[in-house]
Amino acid sequence: MKILIINPNISESVTELIVQEAIRSCLAGTEIVAETADAGVAYIETRAEAVFGAHAVLKKVAKHYEHVDAVIVAAYGDPGVCAAKELVDIPVIGLTEATLAEAHLIGGRYSLVGISERIGVWYRETVRYYGFESRMASYRGLSKGFAHVACVQQEKRQMLLDLCLSCVEQDGADSIILSGAPLAGLAREIETQIPVPLIDGVGAAMRAAQSLASRGSLVRKRGSYAAPPKKESKGLPIEIERLLHKKFQLNDG
């Protein structure tokens, strides 16, 4: 089994962090292929930046989809995930949808802890889109900046720990999602200091991707995730053009 992990941000150091944590969740025989966005921002924090990331995701999916069994979009907020599901017949998993599903299986109410306060607006909108808002206890994010996104969990360890404890003690969380690829691995390191289960986005996505990949192709001939209709296009990356052309041929057939 081969899993493509896409970092929709330009931070190669974060990609390395993601891969290190993903390896811990690999089943026997699972291989990881990692890609980092060619253009975009260091980390996605706004709706506009999410659009940049979504474009990068579609380009990487189009490049690799024929040679992998599943795709993980390794950014909370899931930029490009739903769009990619329309274009390929393999599982495409976002960190948000994977962690929300895991939190619901754990039970009770959950909170999100992230790397900034502003990013919480977009996260809440994503949670609402997926229909998981009713059991969300809170979002808490860092109120101050950090030196480098790949080092935020070391630099702000105590603040992140305090945010987790506040989610439990003040917001009534029964589990906590450490939201965002830059926090990959933190759950494992601080779990003994938090009295409720912690959910790591990369780990949750790896578990979901490997499970879905084992069931085979996800052919969508009808419904909202069926391939888009044939139409003229211009200026798209060559990888996406080729993918669209192939999907059009399959639809015509």
Image (tube, rainbow, N blue to C red):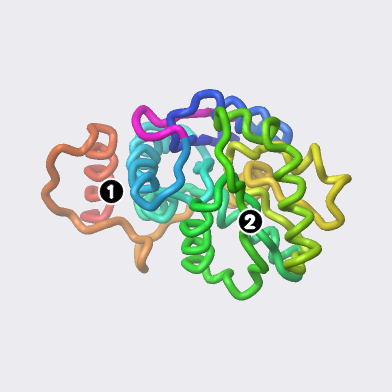
Q: What residue lies at 76% left-to-right and 68% top-to-bottom?
A: 172
Which percent across, then down, holds residue 159?
A: 71, 44
Residue 194 shows in the view: yes
Q: Is residue 198 left or right of residue 195?
A: left
Q: Can you tell which quarter of the image residue 191 is in? A: top right
Q: What residue lies at 52% left-to-right and 40% top-to-bottom?
A: 69
Q: Is residue 74 above or below residue 121?
A: above
Check disc 1 and give the amino acid type.
Lys
Q: Can you tell which quarter of the image residue 175 is in? A: bottom right
Q: Is residue 126 above or below residue 27?
A: below
Nearest the eye: 136 or 2: 136
Q: Are marks 1 and 2 in contact (CB under 8 Å)?
A: no
Q: Which residue is mark 1?
A: 247
Q: Which residue is mark 2?
A: 140
Q: Is residue 236 left or right of residue 77?
A: left
Which percent across, then down, holds residue 73?
A: 50, 43
Residue 216 shows in the view: no
Which percent across, then down, holds residue 152?
A: 62, 34
Q: Is residue 79 left or right of residue 201?
A: left
Q: Residue furthest front?
A: 144
Using the image, tell me which numbered label, if any, was put on residue 114. Answer: none
Q: Is 131 a magenta residue?
A: no
Q: Secondary structure at mark 2?
A: strand
Nearest the eye: 171 or 179: 171
